[in-house]
Image (cartoon, grey):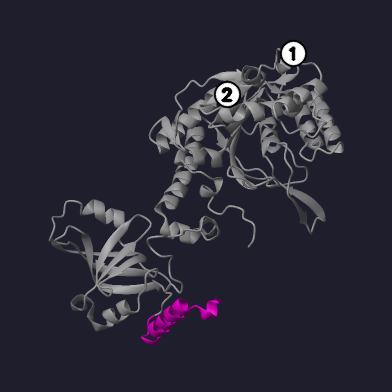
Amino acid sequence: MSVQEDPLREVRIGKRDRLKALGIEPYPYSFERTHEAVELERRYGGLPAGTQTEDRVRVAGRIRAMRNSGMFIDLHDASGKIQLFCHGDLLGAEGIAVVRLLDIGDLIGVEGLVRRTPRGELTINATAITVLAKALRPLPEKYHGLADVELRYRQRYLDLIMNPQSRDTLRRRSQIVAAIRRFLTERGYLEVETPMMHTIPGGASAKPFVTHHNALELDLYLRIAPELHLKRLVVGGLADKVFEVNRNFRNEGISPRHNPEFTMLELYEAYVDYTAMMQLTEELITTIAETVAGSLRIEYAGTAIDLSPPWPRRSMAELVHAATGVDFLAIDNAATAREAAASMGAALAGGENWGQALEAAFAVSVEDTLIQPIHVTGFPRDISPLAKADRNDPRLVERFETYIYGWEIANAFSELNDPQDQRERFEAQMRARAAGDEEAQPPDEDYVTALEYGLPPCGGLGIGIDRLVMLLTDSPSIRDVIAFPTLRPR
């Protein structure tokens, strides 16, 4: 049915036109209100049932229910609900004429006197009603709401109107981001901003989105990570501790845990290594959990998770060995490593090096079992071009990933600051790109030049904010915690 053929919409358009005929503008410029619903509930919490006050208030919100031909209206604002009593003795004939032209979904402003009904409902006796936005489309049916989950994501505004849980989730996301900023600034970190369009994509192994700058006649890449620019700021001495809450874009698949556009916290601290980042990760996540969830014991998808520190630290190879009996540290060539990974069910392309084979074995045999918080250390050097080599085993680097509920939540390094080593790592990535690896990083010569001016010993940390919000709000999909997730057009 086309918009023009929608009979419910036509009825509402008719009411809008009748409002105009009465000299009422259905889309005015403003309305001065004195209170929100929650403020009135607090202020009049002790008002006895059956009590009428002479307190005049002005509120505004959306009509969510109408009873007795509009005599009683439930008005919802961002804070909660307040009941309105609309009667001709108070509103007069002109006011009742406006009430007759209202529908569920309309936005209105109300002036009136506060009372508590004999049944105990806090109510405003309306003395004036102002139409603020005449809704031309009906809301979804009250009791079934939005049954189409995809419609909830496509028309998030309807989801937020109808579903208190969706509003609560996105509000808690805002609280989480605010708490992260507060935690870091209180510890001396400086918040910074770095470019979202790069001439060279870097800082992560991922396929970028490409755009074009017309004036410069230049292809640019949407940021896959802010890492290299943040470390340039540390080289420049802007601060010894910097962080960015950043939007990243990766041209990859979509899943319940992956969205092409996502939010990360990334930070760097001079003169520390990755062990300091482990401590910081635990302190940050536990502080956020206590602030937002009120406890270190949370539940996700029916599974109890205890965030109480300290969290165990075990190497990738150790975990694979414990799960499968295969010791990758005893394997000295890529072909044997690939055979071992394939025997575990890992899907391989055939040209993986030793480190990629170990990573594939870990993904298929261990990752999903890491339900309680754990720091996985001992990452292969082959897959970590920006991390310092392990002090005891040159095949590995000083890197960890933190896992909770089988998901990577955090990723951190002792940052590589040797420019010659970095150039050699970039060259190895170039060879991988030439061999067909689309996610291998291209060399960034200016970044190597920056390192030649001296990057102090440095620890770096990235935390996926979307996944953290999923955990702390018990949300089954990343689409639930992103206001406007990426969707395939219908």
Q: Position of residue 460 (x, y in %)?
A: 63, 29
Mark 1: which amino acid? Ala
For disc 2, the marked residue is: 375
Whether 118 is drawn above or below 282: the answer is below
Nearer mark to the viewer, of 2 and 1: 1
Mark 2: which amino acid? His
| The quadrant where residue 439 appears | top right
Secondary structure of the residue carrying numbered label 1: helix
150 in magenta: no
Instruction: Judge the density around disc 1: few (<14), some (14-19), many (≥20) Cα neighbours within 10 Å.
Output: few
- Whether residue 241 appears in this view of the structure is no
For disc 1, the marked residue is: 330
Q: Is residue 214 left or right of residue 23?
A: right
Residue range in magenta is: 1-24
Whether 293 is drawn above or below 140: the answer is above
Residue located 83% across and 31% down the image: 351
| The quadrant where residue 122 appears | bottom left
Please report whichever mark, 2 or 1, sits nearer to the chain's N-terminal start. 1
Residue located 87% across and 37% down the image: 434
